[in-house]
Image: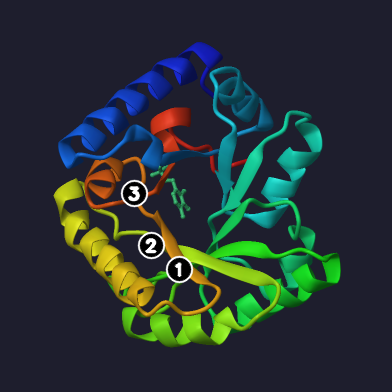
Amino acid sequence: MLTENDIRINLENIENRIKAACERAGRNRNEVELIAVSKNNPADCVRSAYNCGITTFGENRVQEMTGKMEVLEMPLNWHLIGHLQTNKVKYIIGKTKLIHSVDSVKLAKVISEESVKAGIVTDILLEVNVADEESKFGLKPEEVEAAAVEAAVLKGVHICGLMTVAPYTEDPEKSRPIFKQLKELSVDIGRKNIDNISMSVLSMGMTGDFEVAVEEGATHIRVGTGIFGARDYSI
Ligand SMILES: *Cc1c(COP(=O)(O)O)cnc(C)c1O
């Protein structure tokens, strides 16, 4: 587990790299939101990052996220970024700022039903498996528009954009075509002006490739290891 000082140094480094990527792309720094991915790191790491000015955190498992919510008293924005099972939806409704990982219309329906019950509308992204990897969750690019149209009529969700996880690679340039494709897809769907669908959010880029993602138009980047160090999978 890293100390608060280590986390502060890492955050400064990430921040400088985000700024440089924004400059290269002619974008404003405030167009990109950094989500600190705290999965497999204890709540104390979240506290350390909060002390360094971070208020937005990402988790990929419901139980881990709600566990941290219970022990942390600060006002934090939680984003769910990992695969969500329909039977777990009820535990997070009203507690997440944005669900990035909606990979089926069925899941969107359950999120909507639970949200309607709670009297709220939940912001969601559709997860796209751009590279069509067997091991990954997400809609195929060619399925996304139809899924968006089907989910758009649901009363309890608002579709805010798209999310992808690029295939693992040592070379961030290999992610560029993936990010370009997600951006194109979001522009194509956005142009159709479908009711209850906005394509303002593009969640892409992780520790290994967030600079490329920023250059290609990411509005939300999800950085874990680069902030908190290597994850401990025993917790
Ligand atoms: C773990 C995870 C991240 C962060 O990955 P790092 O490589 O540690 O930055 C981002 N997005 C998703 C969906 C994740 O599961």
In the image, taking residue 36 as reference, residue 110 lies left or right, namely right
- 10 Å crowding of disc 3: few (<14), some (14-19), many (20+): many
Q: Is residue 171 visible?
A: no
Task: Residue 157: name its quadrant.
Answer: bottom right
CB-based contact (under 8 Å), mark 2 and mark 3:
no
Q: Mark 2 belongs to which amino acid?
A: Thr
User: Considering only vertical position in the picture, is 151 above or below 157?
Assistant: below
Q: CA distance from mark 1 to mark 2?
A: 6 Å
SS at mark 2? loop
Task: Residue 178: name its quadrant.
Answer: bottom left
Badge number at residue 205:
3
CB-based contact (under 8 Å), mark 1 and mark 2:
yes
Which numbered disc, 3 or 1, marks the residue that appears first in the sequence? 1
Please provide percent x and percent y for residue 32: 38, 41
Task: Residue 13: name its quadrant.
Answer: top left
Q: Which residue is rendered at x = 74% and y = 58% of the image?
A: 92
151, 206: nearer the viewer: 151
Which residue is the site of mark 2?
A: 164
Which numbered disc, 1 or 2, marks the residue that appears first in the sequence? 1
Q: CA distance from mark 3 to mark 1?
A: 13 Å
179, 117: nearer the viewer: 117
Which residue is the site of mark 1?
A: 127
SS at mark 3? loop
In the image, taking residue 226 as reference, residue 93 lies left or right, namely right
157, 131: nearer the viewer: 157
Q: Quadrant of the N terminus?
A: top right
Q: Which residue is rendered at x = 56% and y = 80% of the image?
A: 152
SS at mark 1? strand
